[in-house]
Structure formats: structure tokens, C-alpha cells
Image (tube, rainbow, N blue to C red):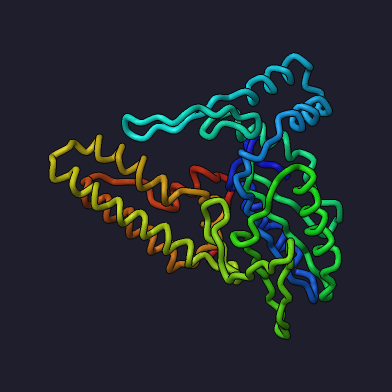
Amino acid sequence: MQFAYRPNHSTDDAISTTLHLSLTHLENKDTYVRMLFIDFSSAFNKIIPQHLTEKLSVLGINTSLCNWILDFLTGRPQSVRIGNSTSSATTLNTGAPQGCVLSPLLFTLLTHDCAAMLSSNHIIKFVDDTTVVGLISKNDESAYREEVQRLTAWCTDNNLSLNVEKTKEMVVDFRRAQSDHSPLNINGSNVEIVKSTKFLGVHLAEDLIWSLNTSSITKKAQQRLYFLRRLRKAHLPPLILTTFYRGTIESILSSCITAWFGNCTTSDRKTLQRIVRTAEKIIGVSLPSIMDVHRTLHPQSQEHCG
């Protein structure tokens, strides 16, 4: 499930898919979900061009384009400049250039064959953000742990290193009689089990409640209200103030909103709406409510209060 370059898909869909798989499974008796949020060490820098072009050839990319990509990734001179001082150049023959728009696409193509082998597991990918979702029934984690071992071996075969220290796992378990969950062990180190984590910019909690995410969004938006007030004091016209609001504040409030807003509590929705009302008072014009923003981005949605 690679969402980065699928038409009409985005981070919202990657998050929604993860949640849908989890919630659908949790409706069954004696079930829980384990989510492994993988962190790669310098993912783009670990690409081996020759290995990449072999995979591109398997995907049907013509030889001329494969050779162009190989030439693009190899023999790249690189130096470091600090002020007026520049280091000697080093020629790089591995990895993809940082900041290049082609690099995420190449990494996506490199990892196209990283897929779950067992039906109870799912691997959600968004470029180098990879999440393993294990749907556990009757405390049988063998398939999930086998999948993680297989993924670890796949990473080794593809010259990718898992940063176990930054890799986190979250367990969603709503059963009344819960037991302690044994941590995963990857390359001799235990993966930390956390109560919440940040997934594609959205805060997920083990109880699947969005209060933590709302608090984070509210804090960021309030910080930007300060700059909106400063612009108002500079006597900028409402049109420019509104443009600033849409680009720096509403963009935060609406980030992945189709994935989480529908299950927000009434209290969380009121908290977000207070940001909009404050901005209205500063600018002096009416602004779309947080509900209107959600409906615009997700017109088929229905309201659900958590």
C-alpha cells in the first residue's frame, strides 16, 4: 500500500486506511492491533544505483531511462561550504541527492516489492515512512512477528538500515482483560512501546482519541495568530490578512482533516473553532468554520461526534 504517487491519494488516505484496518479488526472478539512505525537510517543515502536500476528493469522501465538514472546517481561530486571556506570534492556513487524531487520517487520504486506476505498484516508506505499493521486475534502474534522478521531481512537485502532506537510500536487493545505485551526485538534491541506517536504529521494515541492531535494543532495555530495580529497592527488590508490566515493558520487546522475530524469530540471541535473565531476578530471578516473546511475537503463525509 504505497500512497505517495497513487492518483487522488495523499497522507489523509494513508492514515485513514491504517485506522480503517484497525477499527474493522477491533470489532471482532478477542482482538487487538500492533502498529510498528519504522524509522530508516538515512534512507535516501542508502540507495544503491545498480540495485535500483535492476528493479526498474523488472518493472518494465526501458533500458535508456535506466541508464540515465544510473548516470544521474553515480559520479556525483559533493563538497561542503561554510562561509567562504569550501572543502575538497568527494565523488558519490550511492544514494540519491537530498532535496531532489526525483529522490522520493526513486525510493518508492526501490521499495515497491516491500509488501506484507501474510493476510493478517499490512504494510502502509508513504515514501520512506513505513508502518506495519498487525491484526492480532486470540493473542497469536506469530504471523506479525514473522512479518517483522521478514521485513528486517528485506531491509538487509536492500541495503536499508532500521533505526531501532527511533522505531516505535503502539498497541491498540480495548479488551477488558489486557495482559502485558512483549516488545519486539529487532537486531538485538527491543522496540519501545509508546502510548502515542506522530504518524505522517498526525498524533495517534493508543485509545484512538484525537485530543492530543487537537492540542498540537491548536498550539501551532495560536503561535501563528501572533503574526496575524502584528500584520493587523501594520494596517494591512483584510484581503492580505485573509490570505495569510488561509496559508499559515487554516492550513494547519485542515492538515489531514478528513482522517481525524469526523471522530473528534465536541470539545475538540469547539477548541479548533475558537481559533477561527479569534482570527475573524483580528481580520474583521467572516471565515469558513472548521466544519465548513472539513465538508469542502471531504464532501461525502457525515458528522460523527466522539
User: Is residue 303 something that shows in the picture?
Assistant: no
Relative horizontal placement of residue 219, taking residue 168 as reference (left or right): left
Q: Position of residue 202 (x, y in %)?
A: 53, 56
Relative horizontal placement of residue 213, taking residue 64 as reference (left or right): left
Relative horizontal placement of residue 264, taking residue 267 as reference (left or right): right
Query: Which residue is drawn at the image coordinates 76% and 42% (left, top)?
Result: 158
Q: Quadrant of residue 127?
A: top right
Residue found farthest to the top: 64
Residue found farthest to the front: 88
* Rendered view: 138 above or below 245: below
Q: How many marks?
A: 0
Query: Which residue is drawn at the image coordinates 61% and 62% (left, top)?
Result: 165
Query: Which residue is drawn at the image coordinates 78% and 64% (left, top)?
Result: 135
Q: Quadrant of residue 47?
A: top right
Query: Which residue is drawn at the image coordinates 67% and 53% (left, top)?
Result: 162
Relative horizontal placement of residue 274, taking residue 191 as reference (left or right): left
Q: Nearer the viewer, residue 81 or 187?
A: 81
Q: Position of residue 247 (x, y in %)?
A: 36, 40
Q: Nearer the viewer, residue 130 or 41?
A: 41
Q: Position of residue 118 (x, y in %)?
A: 86, 55
* Rendered view: 45 above or below 141: above
User: Is residue 158 something that shows in the picture?
Assistant: yes
Q: Quadrant of the N terminus?
A: top right
Q: Quadrant of the C terminus?
A: bottom right
Q: Position of residue 201 (x, y in %)?
A: 52, 52
